[in-house]
Amino acid sequence: DKTGTVTTGRMSLVDVVAHGADESEVRRVAAALEHGSEHPIARAVATAAPREERPEVSGFANREGLGVVGDVSGRRTAVGRPALLEAEGLALPAPLADALEAAQAQGRTPVLVGWDGAARGVLVVADTVKDTSAEAVARLRALGLEPVLLTGDHERAARSVAAEVGIETVVADVLPADKVSEVRRLQESGRVVAMVGDGGNDAAARAQADLGIAMGTGTDVAIEAADLTLVSGDLRVAGDAVALARRTLGTIRGNLFWA
């Protein structure tokens, strides 16, 4: 997984582009709705406006892998990926489509907010790659493993991170159920799969994998669904765990042979 595993998961809001509404209103509405979500991207958007400026929200609902919806000040509002706004019947004006494209080209993550029939703004958030992730990927390769970046984020942001840490295979723009399908596809092709992640949205994929590894800095749901939990948030420990397990198995086999 990308966010919180290969990257720090500490997303920050770096830009807001509004169209058909004031930028301050876009900030307030998005912050109010995302306040009810625990996703790292949602937490970054929730900081877009101070708590006392956020309007009241009712009918909050999470759309898994897509975003959130609810009634903000009596208006049906959606915050999330373009597919969510499309499903809610919210049109994407050309200026916001351009802002979306520009953010993706920079390897950042754009979040759309819309109400009253159209998208009203794009909030751009950015994440940083952990200092140890490139070394961690190199260790996994040295162990004969093939790293794959599996993420619900858009293709360009995913490939930007993958290039930074040395991962060639990227599967992006996938919903949680698609992550499970991708793990199953690899298994059906004869591969043995370990899935590493830190959140609830990839818990099912870890459960499907032959080995589910949770980051110790992740959510309780992530840890509960894993076979193995790395006490730290350092991805290098995943390689250490595999090497230790192989060494242990070698010792067991040696003991059985001499017995």
Image (cartoon, grey):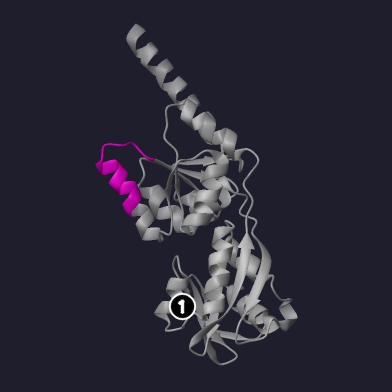
Q: Which residue is depicted at the point 67% across and 65% down?
A: 13
Picture coordinates of residue 61, whole percent (x, y): 48, 77
Is 7 placed left or right of 12 in the picture?
A: left
Height in image: 199 above or below 137? below
Give the number of marks.
1
Residues in magenta, as a range: 181-193
Picture coordinates of residue 245, whole percent (x, y): 45, 27
Question: Does residue 147 appear in this view?
Answer: yes
Q: Is residue 187 magenta?
A: yes
Q: Which residue is depicted at the point 61% across and 41% down?
A: 232
- Of the 4 image quadrants, the one containing the C terminus is top left
Q: Quadrant of residue 204?
A: bottom left
Q: Which residue is depicted at the point 65% across and 56% down?
A: 10
In terms of secondary structure, what is the magenta stretch mainly? helix
Is 202 placed left or right of 108 in the picture?
A: left
Is 135 placed left or right of 225 in the picture?
A: right
Picture coordinates of residue 115, whole percent (x, y): 53, 86
Report the front residue among 233 and 86: 86
Height in image: 24 above or below 35? below
